[in-house]
Image (cartoon, grey):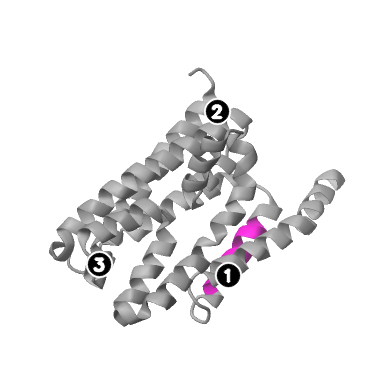
Amino acid sequence: MADPAVRAATRAGIAVGVATAAYGISFGALSVAAGLDVWQTCVLSLLMFTGGSQFALVGVIASGGAAAGGSAIAGAALLGARNALYGIRTKPIVGGGFWKQVAAAWLTIDESTAVASAQPTPRSRRRGFWVTGLAVFLGWNLTTLIGALLGDALGDVRAWGLDAAAGAAFLGLLWPRLKRLQPVVVAIGAAVVATVLTPWLPPGLPVLVAAVTAIVVGLTNWFGRRSTSEGSAA
């Protein structure tokens, strides 16, 4: 493996997978505390495999019990809808073949999409997608089991700050791309929109609105043209 871009994509995928796996302990413990047993928790991670939707599901169940099942499923589905948008971006990356597309659909999540999109070449993007998706899948399911088994021994898992690991991994991916005005404006705008709307809208909707905001700003490229014009004038 002599291609430096491919090596960098592999390292990034493994690093993000490890960081995200740490967050899985928190989910496993919270799920058991919400009333699901160990096997239900593990099956949820295995089949649903999208952390945000899983947290939304167990969060609603924890607050409303079995009667909140409908709301929990609706919230989880809303939050998971963003993966359909990711699929548009990742389909050209993973290539053809029915079973490959099926596997890719399962592994199309925030992390695999972010790592793949950050790579400079088609080969490194493909490597970044698969390495990240598999690393997160294996790590997430393993730490979900650990968190579910430890359960009460961990106490309030939110106090451990495990959620910061995933956020730090995303920031590490995003930071090298913030070299021009356009991506900086897109990142700040999407973060502000999601932060402001989070207390007011159902789980999942702030993320979708922030994504639409980022797409609109990206398509207009208004700040990109401004940067180019300033560069030409200089």
- Write down the region rendered in magenta: 184-195
Count of marks overlaid on the render: 3
Q: Residue 136 at x, y = what percent?
A: 39, 45
Q: CA distance from mark 1 to mark 2?
A: 32 Å
Q: Residue 167 at x, y = what percent?
A: 43, 56
Quadrant, the C terminus? top right
Q: Within 10 angstroms of label 1, few (less than 14), some, or many (20 or more) residues?
A: few
Residue 33: name its quadrant: bottom left
> Who comes first in sequence, dot 1 or dot 2?
2
Question: Please, which residue is most extreme toward the left here?
Answer: 153
Residue 178 seen from this side = no
- Report the amino acid beneath label 3: Leu
Residue 148: name its quadrant: bottom left
Q: CA distance from mark 3 to mark 1?
A: 34 Å
Left or right of 134: which side holds 122?
Answer: right
Q: CA distance from mark 2 to mark 3?
A: 43 Å
Mark 2 lies on residue: 5
Mark 3 lies on residue: 36
Mark closer to the observer (2, 3): 3
> Who comes first in sequence, dot 2 or dot 3?
2
Mark 1 lies on residue: 192
Instruction: Note whether 221 is above or below 7 in the view shown.
Output: below
Q: Residue 40 at x, y = what percent?
A: 27, 60
Helix, strand or loop status at disc 3: loop
Instruction: Note whether 163 is above or below 62 in the view shown.
Output: above
Helix, strand or loop status at disc 1: helix
Helix, strand or loop status at disc 2: helix
Instruction: Note whether 39 is above or below 2 in the view shown.
Output: below
Residue situated in front as seen by the camera: 69 or 186: 69
